Amino acid sequence: MSAQWSYITEELLASPLSVSTLVESLKTTPESIDDVFYELILSIAEYDRASTATYSSILAALFKEFPNNEEKFLVLSQAFPSTSSLNSFLKNCSIDKSLKVLHLDKNILKSEGIFPDYGRYQYIDARTRIFSVDSYSSLHESSEGFAKYISEIISFMDKPENPSDLVDTLDQITVIYELDANRCTLIMLNIFANFLGDKEDVVLDICRNCSWWRTQDSNSSIQSTINSYLLNVREENILELRMITLLIKHEILDFKQVYNCLGPLNVKIIDSATTEANESNEMNELLDTTLEQKQKDAAVSNVSALAMASLLPDSDDEEDNKGEKEDKVATSETLAQETILDKSKYFNKVQLLDSFIHYKMFEYIDVVLGEFPEIPLIYDRIADRLNDLVESFITPFYFEFVDNLNLLSADVEVEVTIQINNLDEMFDAVIPYVNLLKYKIMRNSSLVTKLNEICFEFFRNYIFLYLPFSHNIPLVNESFSILSCYPLETRYNLYGEYSVMVKKDPATKLNNDICEKKTKDLLKRLSVENINTSCRSLNKLISVNPIAASNTFISHIESYSSLIELVCESSKFFNDFAWDVITYQLLTKLYGNRSPMQPDGINYTQWFGNLTQFIGKLGSLYPESFQLSPILLSVVKSLINKNFCVLEILQALINSMTGIKPINNLSYQQIMRLNAEKSLKQNHA
């Protein structure tokens, strides 16, 4: 027997656009909307009269003209037997999901995937409303219970015995005093964090016996508690984070959830229910701020004290401007906002990275550094941790291939964190960390020494450019002992690379500028009377930073010929590195872009004449230390290229080193004795 359709007729289903006629009729009798919904649901559930798209378009048109009827439609649909066609239509119809969750049967919600977490939320609701008991989460609400809870844990840690007994005792205290389990968990983490040094195994045993978390379970409840705590805590150093890291290592807690709860956050929390994406890279902004501060320090270090001094303000002007200054200060305080340095105090992902390095969790270290490669350049403690980590896994390889003194005895155990069997594996393991550390690798002298001895090429590409030319003379000398094994061209190329790099890197430029300023100050005081004291000071400066110191005094010699004798006298204690760099600096000055001739084309410029005298004087006084061969080779090549200006260099060498030197300021007595022969010789004897 076919049904009689008053509203959802065959004509309507054949031409859904005619729904406007139905809508107009319903405007006169709006109470008939219930009958329309009934026929529509009946057609969907029991009769295959049209496609789902046709029914959806009709329903959408009805909701558009008669809003706020979605709940009525859902309630009416639950009066019909559940069928696959009706369930599918209810899932895909244009009704808000929250209304579906509120009015549809739970079997439909589960089977159609409308609300897949229905079972979990049902359990939480039942636990809260039916099975839950009152519990105290604040310490003052049950001070006696929490005091006993804390006391039991600390007493056990002083004399650890059976962890399961402690867990049973804690459970009893929790039940008797109706303590909140989440608060108890945080208290336990806080206490355990103080015993991770020598009692880490005991802490792990207690955690494994605790009924609140299991390695094989999801631990969603305790995970949610910790996530909420980390999101709301605002401390520069979270005590419990080391303990949380240990639980992540043993797969009790989920790394991603903990990581996403720590700053800098990828989202901005507007309120408890609203967030938005954080598009700014706060860590990169912090790095820029740090580098700007280092550039300011570098600029200040190269300015004399007299230039930095300013005129004292007039007392009358100071009183007149006092009121204006106070107004400006008040205005600036009201407009003050949280700077990136203030925010950086709560970048707890840095602390989490520190804990990962402590436990050598390389997978998670790579995740953090992959997102924030700036961290080692900003935080010295992370750079030191990474240096120690790199040293820990290259040390076995170092002892195997480089330990010529047998420093590693048979009874010394070395922890192998990353297996390295050859240089290729060492490069693969070390270079990613060195690229992140850059000049911070020089904070660990032991690591640098091992890397120098393992491979010369590694030294050339990654070590020399970031040497700390501000202190540690033995380390600089050790580095040159490796560098001296390279050909002359390679060493000079490396000096050139360093000269270019020092202009771009603020930290290295700071050390370079400090050395240049000290050298300039020393040259101003240099005289015949204090030559012995100044000699030691100049030797120390050029031993610490030969490139900066030699460039400074050679530049001064170009302008002041009076410094030639004094600097040559002070050069008697220079080391091999200094002599190597001095020759490089002289060649760089001589064969730069400047012309050695004056505009008249006859006379040499002052700087060129002073440098040739300096070269001749050094060749005469220190023929064994001063490296003449590169200079003579450059003279020969210049003559081949028909550059005859270099003959002045050759003439200065011949005059100085052979004893033949023209004298223009002879005294009257010297002139009278020019032909005295025997008497002149007796006088000099």
Image (cartoon, rainbow, N blue to C red):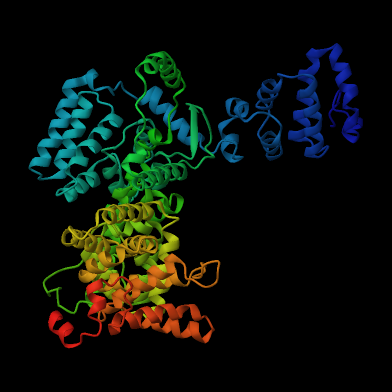
Residue 108 in percent (x, y) is at 60, 35
Give the number of marks: 0
Residue 67 in percent (x, y) is at 74, 19
Taking the image as shown, residue 11 lies to the left or right of residue 408, namely right
Q: Would you place residue 354 above or below residue 156 in this image?
A: below
Residue 422: name its quadrant: bottom left
Residue located farthest toward the left when viewing the structure as drawn? 159
Name the residue nearer the viewer: 269 or 674.
Answer: 674
User: If the image is split into quadrants, where does the C terminus sit?
Assistant: bottom left
| Residue 357 in view (yes/no) | no
Taking the image as shown, residue 103 lies to the left or right of residue 474, namely right
Taking the image as shown, residue 554 lies to the left or right of residue 411, namely right
Q: Would you place residue 651 above or below residue 58 in this image?
A: below
Residue 171: name its quadrant: top left
Residue 91 in percent (x, y) is at 66, 36
Q: Would you place residue 225 above or below residue 139 in this image?
A: below
Name the residue nearer the viewer: 588 or 613.
Answer: 613
Taking the image as shown, residue 349 lies to the left or right of residue 577, namely right
Residue 511 in percent (x, y) is at 33, 54
Name the residue nearer the viewer: 500 or 146.
Answer: 500
User: If the image is split into quadrants, where does the N terminus sit?
Assistant: top right
Residue drawn at (89%, 24%) of the image: 20
| Residue 495 in view (yes/no) | yes
Residue 112: name its quadrant: top right
